[in-house]
Amino acid sequence: MAEKRLRVILLTHGGAEEVIQRLLLCDDVEIAGIFVEKHITRQYAMREKLRRSIRYDGYVATATKLVRKVVSGKEKNVHQVEADELRGRLETVARNNQIPFYVVDNYHDPGTIDLIRAVDADLAVIYGTNIIKEAVFKLPRLGSINLHQGLAPYYRGGPPVFWELYNDESEVGLTVHYVAAKVDSGDIILQQTVPLKYDYKYGLDYESFIADFCDQLRGRCAEMIADAVKSIARGTANPRPQDPNLGKRYRLPVKAEKDQLRRRLRNRQQRSAETWKHS
């Protein structure tokens, strides 16, 4: 009689097609369901929206957004439109591979929790979501794992790559770990590092550089997730605990920190040019 395969569910907001394809190649693994959260943007009152926009983007960007809203007559939720497109692509992959596909309003709604529990999964893979609470990530028999683009425990939280650039690091980490109550603090299953060197063809548009840099890592991230799941399925995983005294949890940069990164990138470029000129 064939051995029982590890029943895995995937919780994602989209962009996980390559992860699915890698998991489908694992003989020891069965994808028991894909869960996609519909409402991924937090709703704020107008005053709080303005306060947050000024804090994270500055007065000029906030004024520009307000003008666009007045001119168009409505506020287009670009993030939600992108999320809908990602969900559509993911649903196509699920349908083509006969994987149960669930679209839920919120992972933490009681009905969603009951639905996840009913799937009776052994393990959950969390890929590109908002923070998942313990009421959800502990539902599978073996808990949940997550792919974090950062060298835990030194770089926990996010956003990916921004703070490594800010601190002039020469590499970034990729970490597959068990999900714990504190962000990116669970036992590490697999970890790699990737060289990081800013490409000045982007000028000071670090956002585009980070987006392209992370996009190039998609294949490696998917492979690491599949390798971690296979090791768990085969009983060969050897997770190691993190030392909470090392590193820190990073958060979204405010406008001043974004401006500081641009200044640091410009200064590094100038120093590099001076060094090359006198070499």
Image (cartoon, helix red, strand yellow):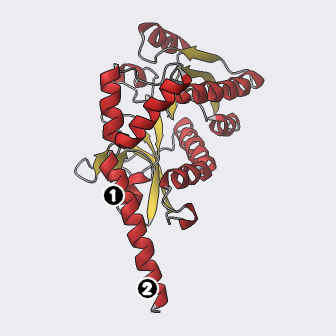
User: Quadrant of residue 56 in the image?
Assistant: top left
| Percent of width and height locating residue 20 | 65, 34
Instruction: Using residue 101 as the reference point, say whether residue 38 is left or right of it.
Output: left
Q: Residue 53 or 107: which is nearer the viewer?
A: 53
Residue at 46% x, 18% y is 107
| Percent of width and height locating residue 17 | 66, 35
| Percent of width and height locating residue 153 | 33, 50
Q: Residue 90 or 124: which is nearer the viewer?
A: 90
Residue labelled with disc 2 = 275
Q: Between disc 2 and disc 1, whose residue precedes? A: 1
Number of marks drawn: 2
Q: Residue lying farthest bottom?
A: 279
Looking at the rendering, in which quadrant would you find the N terminus? top right
Query: Amino acid under label 1?
Result: Gln
Query: Amino acid under label 2?
Result: Thr
Residue at 52% x, 63% y is 203
Q: Residue 181 or 207: which is nearer the viewer?
A: 207
Q: State how far apart marks 2 and 1 are (Cα).
A: 22 Å
Instruction: Using residue 194 as the reference point, say whether residue 57 is left or right of it.
Output: left
Residue labelled with disc 1 = 260
Residue 36 in view, yes or no = yes
Asked if residue 169 is positioned above or below residue 84 in the image, the reply reads: below
Q: Residue 92 or 8: which is nearer the viewer?
A: 92
User: Label 2: few (<14), some or many (≥20) within 10 Å?
Assistant: few
| Percent of width and height locating residue 65 | 46, 33
Secondary structure beneath label 2: helix
Asked if residue 277 is positioned above or below residue 5 in the image, the reply reads: below
